[in-house]
């Protein structure tokens, strides 16, 4: 038997003796004490005797406090109970631990069907009675016993003295030494995180080390990041954490259960709620209506004072998780990683606890493949935590190309490498070095790729995403642009918000359809089109993700948008030398005629094709060769090139005709 159970049973034995004394006192002057039908009805003689009896103001000696250091003593301190509260609670829970109390209470209640203590009986056993206004107040809904969830007063239709009282099973189990959380909390999605782990740093450590309980609203840059850091810091400070992820049905009942569980666990146990539910009022008011448990609310939305209890004091903070803290979390889980872990993880804007989860997943993935943890394992595990839910508005492309697949002049190639560097080092430059401008500007990286069709703009966006280890999401403009006023902006807001909270590269192909120039207002259509452009200008200012805009006509992009661009890359039409490299790159894996290499130089000079057209022509040549069961020849290449000229309606070289 556990020590906690022995302590509780000792207290119940004292209570049993008090009950026995009460039974003996009543039986001595009760003429119906030996009646076998006693409790099933009240006779006229009994009623007359009860009416003639004087009121008893003190019927028994009080039961003493629990021993110092016991669970009962800790519960008394944690919930702010008085000595009378403790006696009431002990009387209420007695039948849940010792069945003999059921019969004794039935006798004392003059009703064998009522085997729980009533308000009157608990007060009599505690040395007072329902005549005492201060004693009756211990059963008020705002009193510590009831507001703390330690005591339930039932039978509301009865007068207060006759109402039955009951201690919830979670309270009984706790006093017996069981720390299993209440089933209702587990069903509501509450995780109980035991103390332990490394000490926190920065803002998270300041919250964890605050000398007194506090209510905090933490505005996160992305869902989960700040809440993970604070929860880890609290655990590192030796405090248990109740992590609640509420749904649409979160209410005050869950809030009260969370507070009770935190107080039962003691030692500064804290509650972390993330994210705030759509209607946070009842839950937040219940959690902020107290001052003895640290509660942290986290979410990407700002704090609304109307959510909290009127008397609540809430500290509003901004998430400040630093890159060093996140990198330390990666290193703690991947101490043997070979390579530059800082460069591998820089594109991912995840918090410390999320980084630890991703690192553990990378280790498991590497073990599954029987290989040491490498860059691909880190990237794949991190991407699992950052998959946008863009639904029908965007198409995901899993990058399968790199810089070696790009055939570009040195200048645009260098600009693309700069774009990758900006994405990797933006937290340091814009955050630590404070080079971000004011006005609520985000930490996003926005690039414009301009050039003729087929010059490699979309391929370059895929290369950038692949180099960063991110997925590429191509916006489907047909599902974004809507004929109804305001709907286009709503669709774009969903896209920007989702990319802000995850890690991915967003591609607006043919961006001039959405980011075009504003025009003079001559009709209502012009006015609403300009409103759409104004919204995009504002949204790009606050964007935190990575976006690439492509256009065939740079002049069509509004100048106000270009000012907000970080990198502008011009993709030139390839010259003969680049075209030859493109031909070789496209046919690198195909079986070729040995004489083809020399002919590719001539073909590149003869046919002025962009990269996309060359890729299509090379595919045509490969199909022709495959149909013959032969290698790719010069004739196949020229045939593919001519078909691209025909498709575009251009004059085919050497023939003097056009379609």
Image (cartoon, grey):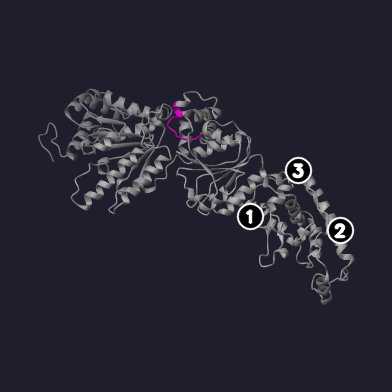
Q: Is residue 548 magenta?
A: no
Question: Dot 2, crowdedness within 10 Å: few (<14), some or many (≥20)?
Answer: some
Disc 2 from disc 3: Cα separation: 26 Å
Q: Position of residue 19 (x, y in %)?
A: 83, 58
In this figure, which residue is indicated by the disc labeled 1?
A: 142
Locate residue 160 relative to residue 343 in the image: left or right: right
Overall secondary structure of the magenta section: loop
- Camera-near label (2 vs 3) is 2
Note whether residue 491 is visible. Answer: yes
Image quadrant of residue 138? bottom right
- Camera-near label (1 vs 3) is 1
Secondary structure found at label 1:
loop
In this figure, which residue is indicated by the disc labeled 2?
A: 21
Earlier sequence position, callout 1 versus callout 3: 3
Earlier sequence position, callout 2 versus callout 1: 2
Depth check: 418 or 14 in front? 14
Disc 1 from disc 3: Cα separation: 26 Å
Question: Over which residues does the magenta segment extend?
Answer: 343-351
**Residue most extreme to the bottom:** 44
From the viewer's perspective, is residue 118 above or below residue 356? below
Secondary structure found at label 2:
helix
In this figure, which residue is indicated by the disc labeled 3?
A: 70
């Amino acid at each position: 038997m556990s020590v906690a159970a022995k302590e509780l049973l000792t207290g119940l034995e004292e209570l049993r003796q008090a009950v026995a004394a009460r039974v003996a006192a009543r039986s001595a002057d009760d003429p119906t004490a030996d009646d076998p039908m006693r409790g099933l009805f009240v006779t006229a003689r009994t009623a007359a005797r009860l009416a003639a009896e004087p009121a008893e103001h003190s019927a028994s000696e009080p039961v003493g406090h629990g021993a110092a250091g016991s669970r009962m003593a800790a519960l008394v301190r944690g919930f702010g109970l008085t000595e009378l509260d403790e006696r009431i609670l002990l009387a209420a829970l007695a039948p849940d631990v010792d069945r003999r109390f059921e019969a004794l209470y039935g006798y004392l209640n003059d009703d064998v069907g009522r085997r729980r203590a009533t308000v009157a009986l608990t007060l009599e056993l505690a040395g007072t009675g329902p005549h005492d206004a201060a004693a009756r107040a211990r059963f008020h809904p705002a009193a510590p016993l009831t507001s703390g969830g330690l005591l339930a007063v039932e039978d509301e239709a009865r007068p207060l003295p006759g109402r039955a009282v009951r201690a919830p099973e979670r309270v009984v189990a706790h006093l017996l030494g069981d720390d299993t959380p209440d089933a209702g909390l587990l069903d509501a999605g509450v995780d109980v995180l035991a103390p332990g782990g490394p000490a926190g740093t920065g803002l998270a450590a300041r919250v964890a080390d605050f000398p007194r309980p506090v209510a905090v609203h933490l505005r996160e840059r992305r869902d989960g990041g700040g809440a993970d850091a604070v929860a880890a810091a609290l655990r590192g400070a030796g405090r248990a954490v109740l992590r609640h992820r509420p749904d649409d049905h979160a209410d005050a009942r869950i809030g009260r259960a969370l507070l009770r569980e935190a107080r039962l666990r003691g030692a500064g146990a804290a509650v972390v709620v993330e994210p705030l539910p759509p209607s946070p009022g009842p839950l937040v008011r219940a959690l902020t209506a107290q001052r003895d448990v640290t509660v942290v609310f986290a979410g990407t939305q700002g704090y609304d004072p109307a959510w909290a209890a009127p008397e609540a004091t809430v500290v509003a903070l901004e998430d400040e998780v630093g890159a060093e803290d996140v990198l330390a979390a990666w290193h703690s889980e991947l101490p043997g990683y070979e390579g530059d872990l800082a460069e591998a993880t820089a594109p991912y804007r995840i918090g410390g606890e999320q980084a630890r989860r991703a690192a553990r997943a990378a280790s498991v993935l590497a073990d599954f493949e029987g290989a040491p943890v490498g860059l691909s394992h880190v990237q794949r595990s991190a991407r699992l935590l950052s998959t946008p839910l863009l639904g029908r508005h965007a198409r995901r492309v899993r990058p399968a190309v790199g810089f070696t697949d790009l055939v570009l002049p040195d200048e645009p190639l260098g600009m693309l490498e700069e774009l990758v560097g900006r994405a990797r080092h933006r937290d340091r430059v814009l955050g630590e070095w404070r080079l971000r401008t004011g006005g609520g500007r985000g930490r996003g990286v926005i690039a414009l790729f301009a050039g003729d069709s087929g010059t490699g703009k979309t391929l370059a966006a895929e290369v950038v995403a692949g180099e960063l280890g991110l997925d590429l999401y191509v916006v489907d403009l047909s599902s974004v642009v809507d004929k109804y006023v305001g709907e286009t902006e709503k669709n774009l807001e969903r896209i920007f918000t989702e990319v802000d909270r995850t890690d991915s590269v967003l591609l607006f192909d043919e961006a001039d359809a959405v980011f075009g120039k504003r025009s003079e207002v001559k009709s209502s259509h012009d006015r609403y089109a300009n409103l759409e452009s104004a919204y995009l200008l504002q949204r790009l200012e606050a964007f935190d993700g990575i976006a690439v805009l492509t256009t065939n006509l740079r002049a069509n992009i509004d100048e106000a948008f270009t000012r907000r661009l970080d990198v502008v890359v011009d993709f030139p039409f390839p010259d003969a030398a680049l075209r030859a490299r493109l031909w070789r790159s496209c046919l690198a894996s195909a079986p070729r005629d040995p004489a083809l290499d020399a002919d590719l130089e001539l073909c590149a000079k003869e046919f002025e094709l962009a990269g996309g057209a060359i890729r299509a022509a090379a595919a045509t040549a490969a199909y022709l060769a495959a149909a013959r069961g032969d290698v790719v020849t010069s004739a196949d290449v020229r045939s593919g090139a001519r078909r691209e000229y025909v498709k575009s309606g251009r004059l085919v070289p050497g023939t003097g005709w056009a379609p």
